[in-house]
Amino acid sequence: MDTATKHLSVTPVEAGSIITPKGFCAAGIHTGVKRYRLDLGVIYCEVPASSAAVYTLNKVQAAPLKVTKESIAKEGKLQAIIVNSGNANACTGIKGIEDAYSMRSSTADVFKIPEHYVAVSSTGVIGEFLQIDKIINGIKKIKALTQVKFDSAERFNEAILTTDTINKRACFRTTIDGKTVTFGGAAKGSGMIDPNMATMLAYITTDANIEPDWLQVALSEVVDETFNRITVDGDTSTNDTVVTMASGLANNQSLTKDHPDWEHFVLGLKMTCEHLAKKIARDGEGATKLIEVQVSGAKNDEEAGKVAKAIVGSDLVKSAIYGTDANWGRIICAIGYSGADINPETIDISIGEIQTLQDSMPLPFSEEEATQYLTTENIVISVDLKVGEGFGKAWGCDLTYDYVRINAGYRT
Amino acid sequence: MDTATKHLSVTPVEAGSIITPKGFCAAGIHTGVKRYRLDLGVIYCEVPASSAAVYTLNKVQAAPLKVTKESIAKEGKLQAIIVNSGNANACTGIKGIEDAYSMRSSTADVFKIPEHYVAVSSTGVIGEFLQIDKIINGIKKIKALTQVKFDSAERFNEAILTTDTINKRACFRTTIDGKTVTFGGAAKGSGMIDPNMATMLAYITTDANIEPDWLQVALSEVVDETFNRITVDGDTSTNDTVVTMASGLANNQSLTKDHPDWEHFVLGLKMTCEHLAKKIARDGEGATKLIEVQVSGAKNDEEAGKVAKAIVGSDLVKSAIYGTDANWGRIICAIGYSGADINPETIDISIGEIQTLQDSMPLPFSEEEATQYLTTENIVISVDLKVGEGFGKAWGCDLTYDYVRINAGYRT
C-alpha cells in the first residue's frame, strides 16, 4: 500500500504529541543516571488502555523486555510506561531482571495501579547494572510532574534520548464512526551507538476504542512496513521496543478488521509510525540526508520491501549518495543480492526524477543534474522490477565520515 | 574444521604462484582499456585441465559468467582463462554476450584449442560496452608472452587488478600417493568499489589428478569456508567468480572422496583459498586492519560461520576496531541478530587474549591492554557459544574514514 495515495483520510496535527489523544499525560525528570540531561520518563493513561507491543528480533534481549512482555501478556492492558535512558539494563543477568521488576513495582505503587499495568523500557550502556536507587527516587517524584501539562510531552521525549540529535514526535488524526480519533507518538533512536549501542524505542498513544488483540494485529502489520523498514547500519539492538496504548476515550465502536473504518485506523497508526521511522533514519549518526527507496513491480509487497531495504542498507549506495554520485550500478547490484525474485533484464531505476536504467540497460543522463539533485536533503530512489504488483518503501541515511568518527569513538 | 590444527600436511611455497603447479603458464598485457596499467591476462594449461567454478549469488550476472558456465558445462575441461580488467561487461545486454563470446573465440583461435576449453572473466566499470577491438588485439599478442616465464604470473596478477592495493597470490604444497601436489592461486578484489563496483575473482591452478565432478565437490566445500566468509561491505558483485584448473600432471591416483589423501587435497585447496581470501579482506578499501573472527561451540559449522560473518560484517564492530575500542557489546549484539541458534546466557567473547564476556556477563579487563592489542594489524575475535561443537571463521576489515572517502568518490 502506498500511503502517499491515502493521506487524505488522515491529517497531521502540527503541535500534537503523545498527550494529545484523550486520557494521556506524561513527564520527564532528571535522576542523575545521566550527568545533566533528563533520564527518566513516564507515559500515564487515566484508564487501563488496550495495549500491544513489538520487540527486537535480536536473540539477546534486555531485562526490561521480559518484564514488559509479562505485563502485557496478563490482560493486554497498560496504564503506565516507565523508561530510563543512560543504561540499557542489558547483559546484566538475574540482577538486571530484579532491577526491571523494581522499576515496575515502584511505578505501580506511585500510580496506585496493578504491577501488570506497567511496562518498562531502558536504553543506553549495556553490561552495567542500573543505578536503581536513583531511578526509584525519580519514579517517586515523577507522578507529580504528570500533572504539569506544559512541556510534559517534550520532557518525556527528551528523557528517552541517548545519541539522538533531534526530538522525535508525531501526531495524526482521523475519523472513525464520525468520531475524531487521535494518534500521538514519541520515539528515540539514531543507529546503534554510544556507548555500546543505542536502541529504537517508540511509544504510540491513541484514544481509539479497540481490543488488545486487534491492536496487536494492526501494530504488527504497521511495524513491518515502517520501523522494520529503516536501517542506519543494519544492526539490531537488544532493547528495541514499540509499545502502543489505546485509551478508548474516543468512544468509537470497538475496532476489528470488519469495522468499516478499520483501514483509517491502520493508516493513522501507520502514518504515525512512518513519521517517527523517517525521523529516526534521518537522525542516523553522521547522516546528512534521508534516503527513501520506493520499489514497485515486485512479486508482492514483502519482496518489494526486501529489495528496498537491501538498497537503503548498502554501504556502497549510502556512500555514493553522500558523495552525490548517481551510482545506479550499486543500486542494481543491491537489487540482485536482495534475495527477492527478480528478472535481471527488466529493472528500471530512477534517482529523483532522473531515470538512469531502463530494462537493466543504462540510459544517458546529465551527471550535473543528478549531482544537483543528490545535494538535496531528501533523496528518493525509485525502482520498478516489472515482475508483479508488489510495492514497498524503506528509509535510511547516507554513510559519512562522521558515522565512522562517532562509532570509532570511545565508550566513555 | 579448524585449519590451524592441520597445517602440517600442507606447506606454503614462498615464491610460488599459479604457474608453479606442473603444466601452467600465464601472461599479462596492456591493451589500452586502462590508461597505463596491464589490463588483460591469461592462464594457459598445456593439457585440457579438469575444471570447476563457483559464481556470484547475485541474480544480476555479467555476460562473461554465462559464457564461462557454458564452456565448463560441456566437458568440465579448460585450457585457458582470459581475463580483462577496466570494464566488467555487466548490464550490457545482448552486445555484452556477443563481446564475451568473441573474447572466447579469439582466445581459442590463438591457442588452437576448442572454444569450450576457454573461460572468460571481466572486472571494472559496469554498464559500458567493452572496447572489444583493443581486447582482441591484446589476445592476439598475449600467447607469445606466455612463453616468457620470468614475471609472467606477476603480470597476470597485475592485469586482473582494479582498486586493489596489493597483488594477491598463494602457493601451497601437499603429498598425495607420495607424489608432490602443488596449488597456485591468484586473486583480485578489495570491496565493491571503483568506478561502480569491483569484483572478487580468484583462479586456482593445481597439478593434482582429479575428475571435474570431484573437483567441483572440493571447490564448493572450500569456497563456502573461505571466499564466502569474507566481507568488506557486505555487497556481492555481479561478476564474482572462482575458477580452478587441475592439470593432472602430478600423476597421483585420480582423487575421490574415498581416496586416502582426499583430506590433504581439500586442505591444500582450502589453505590456498583461505590465504587469498584473507588478502582480499585485508585489502578492503580504506582498511588498516585484518579482522579474523573465530566462533566455536555453535550448533554446527554452518551456524558458526553465520555468527562469525555477522560479527565481521557489523559496521559497528568494524568502526570500533578502527577506533581501538574493545566494544564487546556490539559483538554480542551481532551474535544475537545473526540468525543462528544460540543461548543468550552462555556466550564467551575474547578480543585477542583478553576475555571480555563470560556466560554473557561482562568481565573486568584492562582498557589499556585492549587498546594496545587493537592497535595491531591482525585482530582476532573469538566467541564460544557453548551450544554445540560447530566451528567457523570469517574475515573482514575495519571501517575507516578512507572507506567513505573512496566510496563517496566519483566514478570518473
Image (cartoon, coloured by chain):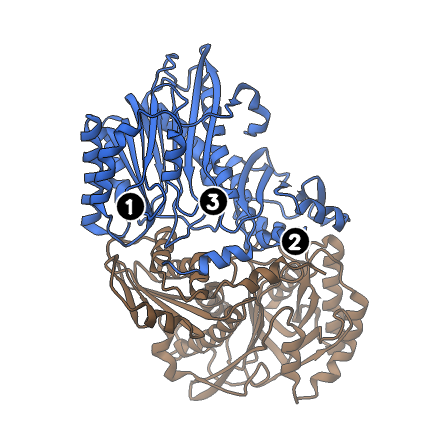
Chain colours: A brown, B blue
Mark closer to the chain start, 3 or 2: 3
* B121 relative to B21 in the view: left or right: left
Q: Position of residue B10 (x, y in %)?
A: 52, 21
Q: Secondary structure at mark 3?
A: loop
Dot 2 or dot 1, earlier in sequence: 1
Callout 3 and callout 1 share a chain? yes
Residue B269 point in image, percent of width and height:
45, 26
Foreground disc of the pair 3, 1: 1
Question: Which residue does the numbered mark 3 point to in the structure image?
Answer: B165
Q: Nearer the viewer, residue A22 or B352?
A: B352
Work out whether B19 lies above or below B55. above
Give the image location of residue B290, x and y in percent. 57, 43
- Per the rendering, the mark at residue B329 is 2
Q: Quadrant of the N terminus of chain B?
A: top right
Residue at coordinates 18% horizontally, 49% vertically from top-left?
Answer: B94
Residue under mark 1: which chain is it in? B
How many neighbours does mark 1 have within 10 angstroms: few (below 14), some (14-19), or many (20 or more)?
A: some
Seen from the viewer's position, the closer of residues A228 and A374 is A374
Q: Are marks 3 and 2 in contact (CB under 8 Å)?
A: no
**Nearest to viewer (mark 2 / mark 1):** 1
Amino acid residing under circle 1: Gly
Mark 2 is on which residue type?
Gly
Give the residue drawn at x 74%, y 70%: A34
Instruction: State whether residue A193 appears in this view.
Output: yes
Determine the CA span between mark 3 and mark 2. Answer: 32 Å
Which amino acid is tagged 3?
A: Thr
Quarter where residue A292 is shown: bottom left
Nearer mark to the viewer, of 3 and 2 = 3
B245 left or right, relative to A244: left
* Vertical order, B308 against B391 (above or below): below
Residue annotated with mark 1: B32
Q: CA distance from mark 2 to mark 1?
A: 50 Å
